[in-house]
Image (cartoon, helix red, strand yellow):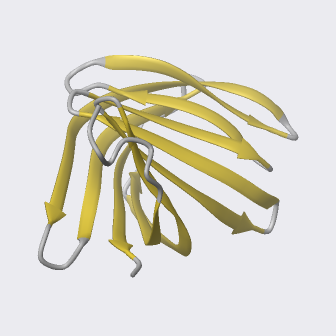
Amino acid sequence: MSLHENKQQKIKVVLQTKIMHEGVTENFEVKTSGLKFRKGSALYFQYAEKTEAGDTQTTIKFKEYETLLLRNGAVKMRQLFRPSEITNGHYESIYGTLPMRTHTESIEHLWNENTNEGVLRLRYTLDVQGGEPGQYELNLNYKEEA
């Protein structure tokens, strides 16, 4: 076990999402604060998102070949990312549960030791309930707080 096991580090988070669907591109950005910690070989990120629908707690579990995105609160979602694989997940809202299929193109994590900041990038195609798939880019930019 490493010295940094389970040590929680406060972080500032900027979550940028780009969605390209049927010729239209949408960009979303959320700024919040959260926590980063390591358990075994996994790096975890936890933060809260505030939307018109209410608050949602988000947890991202990053491993070299797999990333799991969990949301609980106003929105409930489970989405698994594995490069070059198609995985199943679900999205739950007040309107019901929708099945999702994710084809992950790439997962990339970059860390800058000098500035204590990093980015987790996910590129994937998402098909919700058999609809026309959209292309997604998710960038979780984070910086450790002193």
* Whole-percent x, y for residue 67 in the image: 36, 33
Q: Quadrant of residue 143?
A: bottom left
Q: Going by the image, does 37 lie left or right of 53?
A: left
- Which of 144 and 20 lies nearest the eye of the viewer? 144
* Whole-percent x, y for residue 135 in the image: 34, 46
Q: Quadrant of residue 41?
A: top left
Above or below for 127 versus 93: above
Judged from this view, the residue extending furthest toward the right is 94
The residue at 34%/18% (across/down) is 86
- Which of 79 and 131 lies nearest the eye of the viewer? 79
Q: Going by the image, does 64 lie left or right of 75?
A: left
Above or below for 51 versus 8: below
* Whole-percent x, y for residue 136 in the image: 36, 49
Q: Quadrant of residue 113?
A: bottom left
- Which of 47 and 121 lies nearest the eye of the viewer? 47
Q: Going by the image, does 3 lie left or right of 24?
A: left
The residue at 27%/45% (across/down) is 123
Quadrant into which the N terminus falls:
top left
The residue at 77%/60% (across/down) is 55
The residue at 39%/81% (across/down) is 146
Above or below for 144 versus 108: below
Query: In this figure, what is the number of numbered marks?
Result: 0
Above or below for 107 versus 23: above
* Whole-percent x, y for residue 121 in the image: 27, 53
